[in-house]
């Protein structure tokens, strides 16, 4: 760890050291060694890539959910092989990421053999970004699509009350000339975190982001946070996609819908107790030229018509910078994380 | 066929009779018996369900594309079994629907055995609605997702020129208490047909639908049609989904991207020569309760929060009406279709 060349009120830390620090924190707050390693890697990767809303910002929520007994930090996911292309996992009320980890080798093997495979996770808590769940498949030459439902905060299009979660969709595909194309998008018009930030800064939101507690459209972030709700992105189309995420993440897996669990009896609980699905495709089984060459051609044409960057590129640039120069934390966060690791 | 109880300038025809009439038309305009039967069923179903933009409105484009020699109406799709969950079809420059038909039984068998299966169609022309390609799987208790790319007319978010097609995504899932939940959405902000209708009626479009030939945002439908282009729905998110459709429909299958074929040398050609992907999942392999019971619970909750109808319901209502009372065609269309069938 080094504090060279950074402002006095900040601390620069290597990715490896941040991962280790987070691992210690998870270990000391009720997780098994394996769960600690998986969550630390995930959370440090988000911080490294500039996904700050899913980096160390989440630690507080992780730890309070563990302390509340809402999520099981020690449970071992139960992986079931139920078909040539189907893997099922009961996460046992633990986090989703160790469930993905436990099934990953089998899922890849099935995708390569059968051409496509699906991982259906139930009884899981997903509190992280979704792109880390798909990017690794694309790094191995596979195409991956994942959906996860969350907790009621989005009003279906033309409805009067919230029902869906922010329900993200993530997709990853390899390309020959660069890092994989990866997107991770909430199906809500805005992320909850961005509403909180706007409220803190006293900013008005663009129209179409949310409603107040009476269900009326509002541009006031405070009104959205005070008993209001978010809207889906893109009107009825985003709403239909959010519904699809509920069906694939919960109905298909045996997990809860976003409206089916109640955290209110567990003060401190913050993590959505739902389900997740990952579909992995081996593009080598497709027709024609190598997939990565073809996706590179699409990228080339997107640049030609003036697209400034590919989905995922901002993360890759920040990643490179973080790996070269270290990850900058505020002094306050640094002291806080160290205290958590040694308490 | 009967003209009872309809205005004098219209003709009511049964679904069966319309299908047979369209079959005769396709047969007399260069398709094989099988292709004629498949396209007639598809096109009559769209008309029956009130999907007028993909019903008999499309006949002219089908026939002119056949007459131009742009699409092969007699080719037999070549189905390849390339894995426990992967079926590949070379449509041979013919229509996509006969390719789906040729692979369907194998795809369903694989989905039921492996838990998930994918159909990758290349070298195909898709000129129809996408929902008829997914709904039948849900009628058999399966979950289906399909994407198809089309032809350059959508400007990627933050780019300056069109590249993507209208690139629809269709999804179908069974439910216990009613017809399957089915959506079929273009990833463009508006369908091309709706721009044409607005231009004809002299209406101004809502903002965010398209750009003029200089790439400037416009609400004038005529400016969009005169060398302009459409925008994706939902900003960068819809644009990323449209990119995903290109990758899954073309890069994965060995088909053309939306920008890779040139119809200009074949006057009359209207059908996009691309690729299509269908993913079919057997939800019986998932965890927990029966899928259709769970999706019914989601539907129940969507109604509870005030959603007025489920995706697909408008079509089902029109379908029921058409099956009971017949399909109403204008007298002009009726005479035109009869002349096409007997020329």
Image (tube, coloured by chain):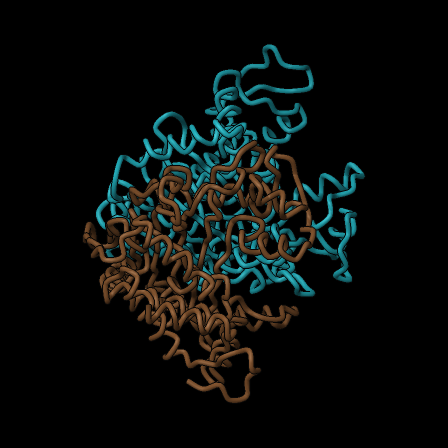
Chain colours: A cyan, B brown
Q: Quadrant of residue A334?
A: top right
Q: Residue at x 38, y 30 (%)?
A: A296
* Front residue of this view, candidates B197 and B286: B197
Residue lying farthest to the bottom in this orientation: B4
Q: Quadrant of residue B144?
A: bottom left
Residue B268 in the image, given as x and y percentages of width and height: 39, 49
* Front residue of this view, candidates B314 and A209: B314
Residue A297 in the image, given as x and y percentages of width and height: 38, 31
* Front residue of this view, candidates B31 and A105: B31
Residue B207 in the image, given as x and y percentages of width and height: 68, 46
Tell me the quadrant of the picture where the C terminus of chain A can be found.
Answer: top right
Q: Establish if A199 lies above or below B324.
A: above
Residue B309 in the image, given as x and y percentages of width and height: 58, 71
Q: Residue at x 78, y 62 (%)?
A: A214
Can the viewer see residue A80 in this picture?
Answer: yes
Can the viewer see residue A151 in this picture?
Answer: no
Q: Residue at x 66, y 54 (%)?
A: A231
The reply, left or right, for residue B114 in relation to residue B165 is: left
């Amino acid at each position: 760890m080094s504090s060279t060349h950074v402002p006095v009120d900040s601390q620069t830390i290597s990715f490896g050291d941040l991962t280790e620090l987070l691992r210690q924190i998870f270990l000391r707050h009720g997780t098994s060694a394996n769960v600690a390693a998986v969550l630390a890697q995930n959370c440090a990767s988000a911080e490294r890539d500039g996904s700050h809303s899913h980096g160390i910002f989440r630690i507080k929520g992780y730890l309070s959910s563990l302390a509340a007994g809402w999520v099981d930090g020690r449970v071992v996911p139960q992986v079931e092989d139920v078909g040539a292309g189907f893997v099922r996992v009961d996460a046992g009320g633990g986090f989703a990421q160790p469930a993905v980890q436990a099934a990953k080798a089998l899922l890849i093997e099935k995708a390569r053999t059968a051409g496509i495979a699906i991982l259906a996770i139930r009884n899981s808590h997903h509190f992280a970004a979704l792109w880390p769940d798909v990017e690794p498949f694309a790094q191995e030459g596979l195409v991956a699509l994942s959906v996860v439902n969350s907790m009621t905060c989005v009003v279906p299009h033309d409805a009067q009350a919230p029902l869906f979660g922010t329900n993200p969709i993530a997709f990853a595909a390899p390309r020959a000339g660069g890092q994989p194309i990866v997107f991770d998008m909430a199906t809500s018009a805005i992320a909850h975190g961005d509403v909180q930030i706007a409220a803190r800064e006293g900013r008005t939101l663009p129209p179409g982001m949310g409603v107040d507690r009476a269900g009326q459209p509002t541009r006031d972030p405070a009104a959205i946070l005070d008993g209001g709700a978010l809207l889906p992105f893109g009107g009825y189309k985003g709403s239909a996609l959010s519904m699809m995420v509920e069906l694939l993440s919960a109905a298909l897996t045996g997990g809860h819908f976003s409206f089916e669990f109640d955290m209110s009896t567990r003060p401190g609980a913050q993590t959505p107790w739902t389900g997740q699905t990952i579909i992995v495709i081996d593009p080598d089984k497709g027709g024609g030229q190598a997939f990565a060459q073809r996706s590179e051609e699409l990228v080339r044409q997107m640049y030609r018509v003036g697209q400034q960057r590919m989905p995922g590129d901002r993360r890759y640039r920040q990643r490179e910078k973080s790996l070269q120069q270290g990850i900058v934390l505020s002094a306050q966060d640094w002291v806080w994380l160290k205290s958590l690791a040694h308490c």
